[in-house]
Image (cartoon, coloured by chain):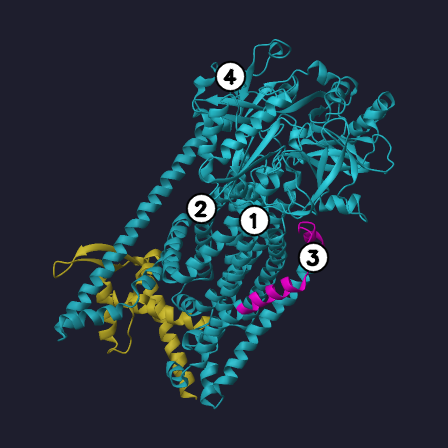
Chain colours: A cyan, B yellow
């Protein structure tokens, strides 16, 4: 036990001693040189030189103090540690001398590795890392499908859930989440919060415990249980300042005092984004409901069952249920999806695309580093020759080069860490709000490992190039003042730059279709305007259960809102374009004269609206009349449809005046079509508009009321007066999802915008690096060929010939890069096209613009060195020889 | 070429050792001594001298220590060691043979 310790201590002491000894030698040597200098100056003065003159001559005679010192160290070389320290100092000085090169290398490294690490960290946190639950691979979600209607993931009705819990054996802990919202009253405002009610098994099945307080207990469930709530960590931080005293206190939720029993861990967002969890006990009505498909079902695979086995069993149960309740379960299929898949599913293309782009950028970075290093090494050949002549051995030449590469890689890695740190923050800030698991994203040990590995790879690459390129030169190269570069090095640089150009082209080719598809989405006719419009939602199931009271409430709110200064229009609807969860309900529609089987009616999206809805949102009337306030409970049952509806259901007849049966949230009612309005695009802005219909809200006053207020001023400024007004009209009501329509639109576009911005940044960065590469190679070419150029100019070659020859080199690299890049892009196109949104990966415009950008960058980079070569003065070059 | 460097190096060592035959000298003194004795034909640069001195010290052919010199400056004096004296006579013998050899070549040219 003690022996190795003692040995280690001794080694440490030895090292320390070696260091001090080394230090003494260094100091001795400095003193010695100082003494030498003093003597030389004194001597020269005795011989008659002035003091200044003597000093100048002596210093010149002494030569490079540093070179001498290095040569001395090469001779006296002490411990390995000492050698490294010495090489590090030498390398440091050399890097400082070549400041431009060093900065460029470190910046390139920081950019490439930093971006790659940031993107990796996000992808790792969201996509790769196992879910933060015990045995996460077992967790699954259950969905019902309706293949005939193309529905692959529908939620599940409460009665179905209760049957599934009884009948399924391959999964355990079958539990449900019921989407819910509660109003929270605070002094001066009432706010509507998204929440989930969860069944008793839910948290135990997941294996999640609150970080503060306790989880639900059996006695929290069931009729008459004391109301309790668990808070989301983010909501707790934001609304209650992270005060743990909140646990145990009560909150005014939906008019009741609800006890806060705990706070869930940060990042826990199941079944979906939420502010709070409440216990869910199915009511009598819910227990019998086989049609209201709104529950999210979670379970754990049991006894080693696979997802497919669980799905087969679920399908079997679905067939049994169809036998028992044919009307409810006709065409219903089963789907079991791993939880991780559900959480990330839709975002996978975004993340994979980003990761791919980061990898390509990394490749460009490495190619650029290689080109830079080759250029620099070529410039160092004379210095190396001098050191060799002074007696430095092959190892003495190679070691500092390696140390230098390691220093560069380390500095680059540190800078890359900074870039990654900022990058992750930027990505998190810019990420789509519904990107899951963001709380788990951060720079961690894995990111550090990645940076370390990349830095080590870079160091190996740089030193490999350096040592490989520096053959110990002979005296002849000392004698010759020419800085001759070998053709091999030049070829290497050209290859590296060609690779950069190729990868940059791949990025550009990948980005431009995205730009175009985004432009298309932006310019697409949405069918409504979002500027100057504020929206919010209230739920009035309990406060206004009677239709008359509900209508009176709506009238009052709309009248008083229109009276607010700055408000020009106000309306309400059961849903909004762009709304978060659903835009309208599925309605069964049967046109007059159409024969359909009961239960298989065609469907359209239906919402109930106030007559002013169209005008407020700027939805254009196409035919017939709009709705009026006369279309109320006592009036004829009417409906307004959109153009997509007209195309689908009344292709060869004017739909106005036709009758149809509409079953929206209840029994089908015959209605007369009175008008046609323009199509609107909703959550999926690039998807074709769906058939939709608008029912007078006064004839079906749905309790979820989304108000829209248009003003003659920025919509944000309307939020405060509108909140005050609502508080004055009915302080019990919570306002949910208060925000501007512009903000909603922005949210919808966000994922694309982020992806686009990042890809564009990557492509720009790569192109810049490639341009730097072209510049470096061309400059070096010019430098190496100065003598040749000078001689040829002296022999009568025209400057244009010289320029032409150099341009040819630049052109060859650029063309090579283009050809390879196009080939690579074509190879990757099939894989890539999956991530492009309905855009051909190879369209002419994208292709042409990418090529133009890259060629322009290459030409710009080649101009200066070529111009410099043309300006070569033959006389100067010859004299320098 | 490697041969030529060895010769040069060997010669520098010989010159240094030989300049220390009579008395210990500091680096500058050695350079002056060689310069004077060769009638300014052989010039030893600082960049060559000090590394060579340290190499000789490491090989144990000279020893170095700090001393106060004539004009009250502290200087690092180099002294021939016993091994240094032996090496000096070896190198001298080799040099004599070398000179005779080269002279022979030149005579017959």
Which residue is denoted by mark 3 in the rendering? A840
Please tell me how crowded label 4 is: few (under 14), some (14-19), or many (20+) other residues with Cα within 10 Å.
Answer: many
Q: Give the mark nearest the N terminus, 4 or 2.
A: 4
**Residue A343 sits in quarter:** top right
Which residue is denoted by mark 2 in the rendering? A418
Please tell me how crowded label 2 is: few (under 14), some (14-19), or many (20+) other residues with Cα within 10 Å.
Answer: some
The percent position of residue B75, horizontal first and vertical second, equals 20, 58
Same chain? Circles 2 and 3: yes
Distance of label 1 from label 3 (alpha carbons): 19 Å
Same chain? Circles 4 and 2: yes
Q: Give the mark nearest the N terminus, 1 or 2.
A: 2
Disc number placed over residue A753 in the picture, else none: 1
Distance of label 1 from label 4 (alpha carbons): 39 Å
Mark 2 or 3, which is nearer the eye?
3
Residue located 53% across and 57% down the image? A365
Disc number placed over residue A260 in the picture, else none: 4
Q: Give the mark nearest the N terminus, 1 or 4.
A: 4
Mark 1 or 2, which is nearer the eye?
1
């Amino acid at each position: 036990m003690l022996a190795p310790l003692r040995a280690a201590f001794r080694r440490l002491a030895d090292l320390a001693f070696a260091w001090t000894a080394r230090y003494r030698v260094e100091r001795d040597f400095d003193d010695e040189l100082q003494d030498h200098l003093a003597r030389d100056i004194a001597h020269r003065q005795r011989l008659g030189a002035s003091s200044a003159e003597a000093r100048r001559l002596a210093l010149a005679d002494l030569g490079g103090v540093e070179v001498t010192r290095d040569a001395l160290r090469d001779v006296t070389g002490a411990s390995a540690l000492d050698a490294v320290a010495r090489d590090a100092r030498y390398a440091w000085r050399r890097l400082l001398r070549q400041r431009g090169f060093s900065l460029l290398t470190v910046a390139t490294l920081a950019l490439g590795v930093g971006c790659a690490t940031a993107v990796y960290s996000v992808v790792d946190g969201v996509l790769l890392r196992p879910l933060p639950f015990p045995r996460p691979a077992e967790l699954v979600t259950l969905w019902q499908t309706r293949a005939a209607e193309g529905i692959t993931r529908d939620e599940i009705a409460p009665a179905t859930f209760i049957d599934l819990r009884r009948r399924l054996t391959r999964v355990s802990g079958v539990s449900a989440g019921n989407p819910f919202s509660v109003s929270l009253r605070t002094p001066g405002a009432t706010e509507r919060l998204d929440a989930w009610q969860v069944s008793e098994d839910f948290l135990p099945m997941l294996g999640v415990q609150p970080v503060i307080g306790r989880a639900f207990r059996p006695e929290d469930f069931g009729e008459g249980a004391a109301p309790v709530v668990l808070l989301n960590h983010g909501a707790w931080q934001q609304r209650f300042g992270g005060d743990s005293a909140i646990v145990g206190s009560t909150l005014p939720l939906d008019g009741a005092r609800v006890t806060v029993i705990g706070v869930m861990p940060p990042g826990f967002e199941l079944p979906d984004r939420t502010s709070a969890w409440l216990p869910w006990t199915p009511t009598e009505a819910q227990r019998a409901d086989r049609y209201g498909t709104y529950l999210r079902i979670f379970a754990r695979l049991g006894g080693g069952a696979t997802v497919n086995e669980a799905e087969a069993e679920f399908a079997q149960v679905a067939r049994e249920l169809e036998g028992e309740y044919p009307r409810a379960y006709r065409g219903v299929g089963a789907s079991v999806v791993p939880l991780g898949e559900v959480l990330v599913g839709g975002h996978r293309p975004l993340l994979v695309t980003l990761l791919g782009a980061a990898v390509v950028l990394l490749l460009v970075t490495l190619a650029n580093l290689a080109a830079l290093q080759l250029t620099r090494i070529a410039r160092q050949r004379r210095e190396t020759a001098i050191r060799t002549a002074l007696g430095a051995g092959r190892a003495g030449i190679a070691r500092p080069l390696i140390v230098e590469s390691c220093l560069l890689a380390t500095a680059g890695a540190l800078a890359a860490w900074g870039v990654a740190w900022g990058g992750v923050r930027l990505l998190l800030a810019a990420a789509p709000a519904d990107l899951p698991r963001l709380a788990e994203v951060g720079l961690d040990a894995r990111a550090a490992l990645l940076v370390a590995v990349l830095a080590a790879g870079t160091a190996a690459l740089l030193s490999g190039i350096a040592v490989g390129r520096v053959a110990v030169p002979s005296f002849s190269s000392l004698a010759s003042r020419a800085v001759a570069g070998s053709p091999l090095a030049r070829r290497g640089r050209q290859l590296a730059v060609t690779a950069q150009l190729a990868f940059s082209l791949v990025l550009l080719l990948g980005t431009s279709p995205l730009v175009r598809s985004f432009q298309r989405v932006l310019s697409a006719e949405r069918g409504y305007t979002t500027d100057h419009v504020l929206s919010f939602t209230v739920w009035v199931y309990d406060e206004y259960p009677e239709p008359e009271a509900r209508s009176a409430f709506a009238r009052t709110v709309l009248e008083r809102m229109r009276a607010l200064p700055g408000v020009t229009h106000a309306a309400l609807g059961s849903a909004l374009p762009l709304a978060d969860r659903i835009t309208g309900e599925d309605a069964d529609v049967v046109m007059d004269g159409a024969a359909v089987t009961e239960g298989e009616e065609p469907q359209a999206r239906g919402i109930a609206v106030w007559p002013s809805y169209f005008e407020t949102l700027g939805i254009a009337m196409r035919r017939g009349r709009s709705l009026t306030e006369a279309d109320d409970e006592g009036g004829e049952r009417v409906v307004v449809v959109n153009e997509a509806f007209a195309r689908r259901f009344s292709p060869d007849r004017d739909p106005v005046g036709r009758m149809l049966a509409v079953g929206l949230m209840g029994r089908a009612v015959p209605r007369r079509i009175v008008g046609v309005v323009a199509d609107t695009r909703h959550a999926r802005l690039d998807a074709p508009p769906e058939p939709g219909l608008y029912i007078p809200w006064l004839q079906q006053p749905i309790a979820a009321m989304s108000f829209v207020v248009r003003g003659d001023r920025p919509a944000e400024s309307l939020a405060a007066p509108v909140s005050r007004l609502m508080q004055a009209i009915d302080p019990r009501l919570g306002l949910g999802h208060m925000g501007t329509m512009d903000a909603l639109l922005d949210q919808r576009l966000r994922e694309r915008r982020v992806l686009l911005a990042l890809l564009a940044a990557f492509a720009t960065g790569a192109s810049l690096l490639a341009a730097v590469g072209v510049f470096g190679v061309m400059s070096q070419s010019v430098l190496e060929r100065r003598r040749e150029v000078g001689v040829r100019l002296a022999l009568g070659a025209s400057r244009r010939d010289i320029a032409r020859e150099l341009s040819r080199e630049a052109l060859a690299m650029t063309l090579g890069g283009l050809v390879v890049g196009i080939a690579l892009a074509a190879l990757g196109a099939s894989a890539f096209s999956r991530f492009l949104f309905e855009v051909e990966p190879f369209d002419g415009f994208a292709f042409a613009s990418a090529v133009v950008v890259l060629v322009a960058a290459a030409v710009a980079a080649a101009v200066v060195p070529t111009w410099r070569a043309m300006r070569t003065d033959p006389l100067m070059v010859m004299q320098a020889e | 070429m490697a041969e030529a460097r060895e010769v040069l190096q060997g010669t520098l060592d010989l010159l240094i050792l030989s300049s220390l035959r009579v008395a210990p000298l500091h680096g500058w003194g050695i350079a002056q001594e060689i310069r004077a004795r060769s009638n300014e034909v052989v010039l030893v640069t600082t960049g060559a001298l000090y590394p060579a001195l340290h190499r000789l010290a490491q090989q144990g052919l000279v020893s170095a220590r700090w001393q106060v010199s004539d004009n009250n400056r502290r200087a690092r004096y180099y002294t021939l060691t016993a091994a240094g004296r032996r090496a000096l006579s070896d190198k001298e013998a080799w040099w004599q043979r070398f000179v005779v050899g080269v002279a022979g070549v030149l005579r017959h040219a």
